[in-house]
Amino acid sequence: MKRVVVTRPVDQAADLIALLARRGIWATGVPTVTIEPQADSLDDALARLDGAGWLVITSANGANAVLERLAAAGRRLPVETRVAAVGPATARALEAGGVRVDHVPDDYLTAAIAAGLGDVAGRRVVLARAEAATADLRQSLLARHAVVEEAIAYRTVEGPAGSREALRDALRRDVDGVTFTSGSTVRGFIALLGIADRPRAEALPAFCIGPVTADTARRVGLRVVAVAREHTAAGLAEAIADYFTEEA
């Protein structure tokens, strides 16, 4: 049986681990990031949504943070504010919390997200994003003359110290690869490595959920062997299974 390491946060690893198990792949969870909601910034943004054309939520973590703050305030989203989710996992998280999602791009890249909002010239677009998110989506929307407001929904802590020994133990076992679902999981993985572990980590196959994550992994010297065609946990599990089948 093939064995891989799943680097997602603890509360998000179970779905990928289960999907891999169904394909005969054993997975162990070693979170290389943790998520810290940022209540103040998000509360302020949600309180000022009246009149906004769009609320754009860029990850499932952001969706969970929005739902948590809406529940804490006993608030609903304004009916006139449309909601965009960056991908199907984000959309599912929102819909599970009772939020209608108006747009999910077919391609989960920045240009497709911005284009899918239609004519946003002069309209307020609120981005609920990670503290460490790039400015790409903001710049794409500004280029379309949107009035962009950003709310920090959560902070990603890369390389939590509590995972250091677990990762070291995993790498010293007979594992066949490591999965990455964001650039932050890659950076957290690298931050946790000891000098002695680096050659082993760089030699292992790296499986990435999408091209942005894959680019991050390659830049830090990891050996990317497969990138999911569909940028979801199911797509990643399928890519991993296909790789091992082809290598058999």
Image (cartoon, helix red, strand yellow):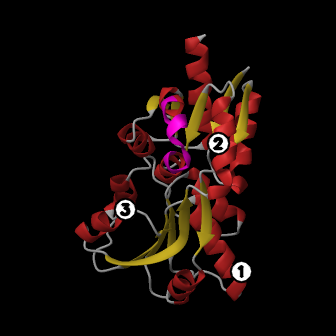
Query: In this figure, which residue is indicated by the disc labeled 2?
Result: 167
Q: Is residue 203 above or below residue 123?
A: above
Specify the quadrant that holds the N terminus. Answer: top right
Name which quarter of the figure residue 51 lies in.
Answer: bottom left
Q: Is residue 225 left or right of residue 89?
A: left
Question: Residues at badges 2 and 1 in contact (C-beta under 8 Å)?
Answer: no
The tag earlier along the polypeptide, 3 or 2, is: 3
Where is residue 9 shown, x and y percent of the image? 65, 54
Q: Is residue 195 magenta?
A: yes
The tag earlier along the polypeptide, 2 or 1, is: 1
**Residue sitting nearer the eye, 186 or 89:** 186
**Residue sitting nearer the eye, 163 or 210:** 163
Q: Is residue 161 magenta?
A: no
Q: Residue furthest top?
A: 248
Q: Amino acid at mark 3?
A: Thr
Where is residue 50 shown, x and y percent of the image? 50, 88
Mark number for residue 134? 3
Give how far apart the Cα atoms at labels 2 and 1 are: 35 Å
Q: Main secondary structure of the magenta part?
A: helix
Query: In this figure, which residue is indicated by the disc labeled 1?
Result: 71
Local SS, label 1: helix
Q: Amino acid at mark 2?
A: Leu
Q: Mark 2 Cα within 10 Å, few/some/many (few <14, many 20+)?
A: many
